[in-house]
Amino acid sequence: MRYARRVVEQGEPKKPGSGVPGTAGGAIASDQGMREERQGCAGILLAAVGAVVAVLVWAPRARVSIHGGFEGMHRDLSVLYVDLPLIAAGGALVPLAAWLLGLRTLRRPWLAAVLAAGALGLGIWGLLSWWTPYERPEFTG
């Protein structure tokens, strides 16, 4: 391993601007790579926050279906294996898609973050205004 490393280090002369730290242009290439890594981490963080927020907003409305309401007569556990994954995926994908679209078109990370937060807010508003679990009438008589 040491021998191979020495051969590589001694074998080919480095060109200026090759992206190797210590040469001309190495700091610029390194900074560009770090910027892309930070933007990628920010996108993943936005997706995780979006998924958590969407599930936390959804959970109080799904409580009736999980606990069953009056005497447990209206229990519907399909909200856990159908609705929960869809809500979490939507909460993760909506801000992530807005973030990526904002980065591609606007080229400003802070503006893309504002766009992603706005998209998450609109998605949460749409979830609260559209999704309501089915509740059968208490008494049919």
Image (spheres, rainbow, N blue to C red):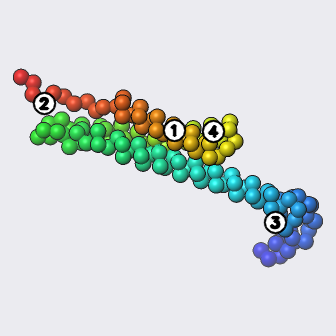
Residue nearer the viewer, 22 or 68: 22
Q: Given the image, on which type of amino acid does mark 4 rest?
A: Gly
Residue receiving disc 2: 138
Taking the view exactly as shown, the residue that stands out farthest to the left is: 141
Residue nearer the viewer, 13 or 34: 34
Single out the mark in the foreground, 4 or 2.
4
Q: Where, by quadrant of the figure, is residue 3 drawn?
A: bottom right
- Tell me the number on the disc at residue 102: 4
Dot 2 crowding, Cα within 10 Å, few <14, some 14–19, many 20+: few
Quadrant of the frame with the N terminus: bottom right
Which mark sits nearer the N-terminus, 1 or 3? 3
- The residues bearing labels 3 and 2 have C-alpha atoms spaced at a distance of 71 Å
Single out the mark in the foreground, 1 or 2.
1
Vertical relation: 62 (above or below) 18: above
Q: Given the image, on which type of amino acid does mark 2 rest?
A: Glu
- The residues bearing labels 1 and 3 have C-alpha atoms spaced at a distance of 39 Å
Tell me whether circle 1 and circle 2 mark residues in contact (CB < 8 Å). Answer: no
Q: Given the image, on which type of amino acid does mark 3 rest?
A: Pro
Residue nearer the viewer, 82 or 135: 135
- Tell me the number on the disc at residue 96: none
Which mark sits nearer the N-terminus, 4 or 3? 3
Could you tell me which secondary element the residue under label 2 belongs to?
Answer: loop
Location of residue 134 in the rendering, given as x and y in whole percent from the top left corner = 25, 30
Question: Left or right of 33: which side holds 51?
Answer: left
Residue receiving disc 3: 21
Tell me whether circle 4 and circle 1 mark residues in contact (CB < 8 Å). Answer: no
Location of residue 136 in the rendering, given as x and y in whole percent from the top left corner = 19, 28
